[in-house]
Image: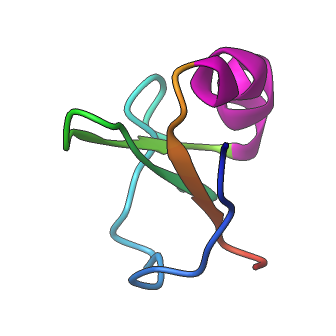
Amino acid sequence: MTATVTSTPLTAADRCDRCGAAARMRVTLPTGGELLFCGHHGNQHRDRLRELDATIATADA
């Protein structure tokens, strides 16, 4: 099951790991790793992240 939760708030200093834009999504992988994505890349990878059972926290959550 994939959870969408509120974690540490994203700040202006948090940048997308793919393109460097402002991060809108913090993803915690089951292995413990963390990724930050802008809205575009977060939406692009959301289905795969859910398949991996990642925890997804969005800036507007």
Can you give x and y, in whole percent of width and height, for residue 18 in the image? 45, 23
Q: Quadrant of residue 45?
A: top right
Foreground pick, 51 / 58: 51
Foreground pick, 17 / 29: 29
Can you give x and y, in whole percent of width and height, for residue 20 in the image? 43, 37
Can you give x and y, in whole percent of width and height, for residue 7 in the image? 46, 80
Foreground pick, 32 / 43: 32
Q: Quadrant of the N terminus?
A: top right
Q: Residue at x 21, y 39 (%)?
A: 33
Bounds of the magenta segment:
39-51
Tell me if residue 23 comes above or below residue 41 in the rendering: below
Magenta stretch, overall SS:
helix
Q: Quadrant of the C terminus?
A: bottom right
Tell me if residue 43 comes above or below residue 14 in the rendering: above
Q: Residue at x 63, y 58 (%)?
A: 24
Can you give x and y, in whole percent of width and height, for residue 22 in the image? 55, 55
Asked whether residue 13 is drawn in magenta, I would say: no
Q: Is residue 28 left or right of residue 41?
A: left
Q: Residue furthest front?
A: 1
Tell me if residue 53 comes above or below residue 18 in the rendering: below
